[in-house]
Image (cartoon, coloured by chain):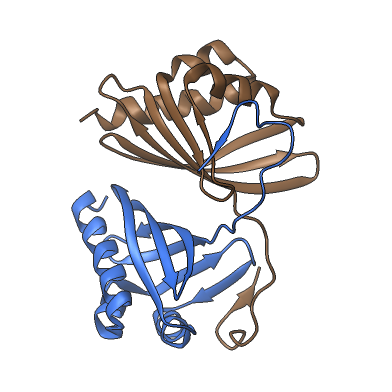
Chain colours: A blue, B brown
Amino acid sequence: MTSPTALRKAVETYWAAAEARDWETFAGTLADDVVYELPQSRERIRGKERYVQFNKEYPGDWHAQVLRIVAEGDEAVSWILMREGLRESYAVNLFTADASGRIAAITDFWPEPYEPPFGRDHLTERY
Amino acid sequence: MTSPTALRKAVETYWAAAEARDWETFAGTLADDVVYELPQSRERIRGKERYVQFNKEYPGDWHAQVLRIVAEGDEAVSWILMREGLRESYAVNLFTADASGRIAAITDFWPEPYEPPFGRDHLTERY
């Protein structure tokens, strides 16, 4: 089991490097055979080279702010606020480390805003 | 800081009790002043009584399967597969414990399926 600190540090570096468009440092956090999955679209990217390219090519002037990282052993989760111009969205990212502390698996969720369902506003408030 | 084991245990109990519709046990995992937030709809529920009622009243014959729990100190995250009939969806839930190990804050994300954007199928596969 990787120490919590190793994977937490890798995830912190992953986001700082992505924000800085420092793709060499970003790549350094990843295992060569990293697997990236998006369960919402059922897309998968295999391998560090393709995954770095995916991030390099990702369109838009986006900025990622880390809201929370929770790390335990070889698992970690980050909660991100992503800004692009006036648009803000959240992401939640699940990470698994390999034995050397590099990121071997990423499962990304990009939840979209929705309107509250009817019938529960006797319990809820809006913010 | 709560021990990782205390909050992990609370989150395990939370899901097992929800699945069993054992609302007394479920309530026992929660702080009296628990705050539940849904950032996608910007809904908030304040207090154990209302939050238990919200879960009791939640429509449908849903079943929650815990895929992963990551717990560190007074923070934890669960990744859930929710089934209702043939419909499957994921949820990611962020928990914060109070000093006694009860769940004081929950931030829930319910990401919906979407079609892959154009222009990246040179890097991705579908699964």
Q: Residue A77 at what x, y percent from top left?
A: 38, 52
Which residue is the extreme one toward the right?
Answer: B86
Snapshot quadrant of residue B75:
top left
Rendered-image quadrant of the N terminus of chain B: top left
User: Which sits in the foreground, B100 or B72?
Assistant: B100
Outermost residue, top side: B24
The vertical placement of B48 against A26, above or below, is above
In the image shown, does B20 or A35 lie closer to the viewer? B20
* Viewer-side residue, A68 vs A43: A68
- Residue A101 visible (yes or no): no
At 57% from the left edge and 46% from the top edge, which residue is drawn? B91
Q: Is residue B17 above or below residue A49?
A: above
Q: Is residue A106 visible?
A: yes
Q: Residue at x 62, y 35 (%)?
A: B64
Residue A88 position, x and y percent, is 47, 65
In the depicted structure, whether residue B54 falls above or below residue A102: above
Q: Quadrant of residue A95?
A: bottom left
Using the image as rendered, state which of residue B88 and residue B114 is in the foreground: B114
Q: Is residue B49 above or below residue B89?
A: above
x 64%, y 66%: residue: A42
Residue A70 lies, in percent from the top left, at 32, 47
- How many numbered badges does the structure rendering display? 0
In the visual, does A54 lie left or right of B70? right
Q: Quadrant of the C terminus of chain B?
A: bottom right
Q: Position of residue B113 (x, y in %)?
A: 67, 60
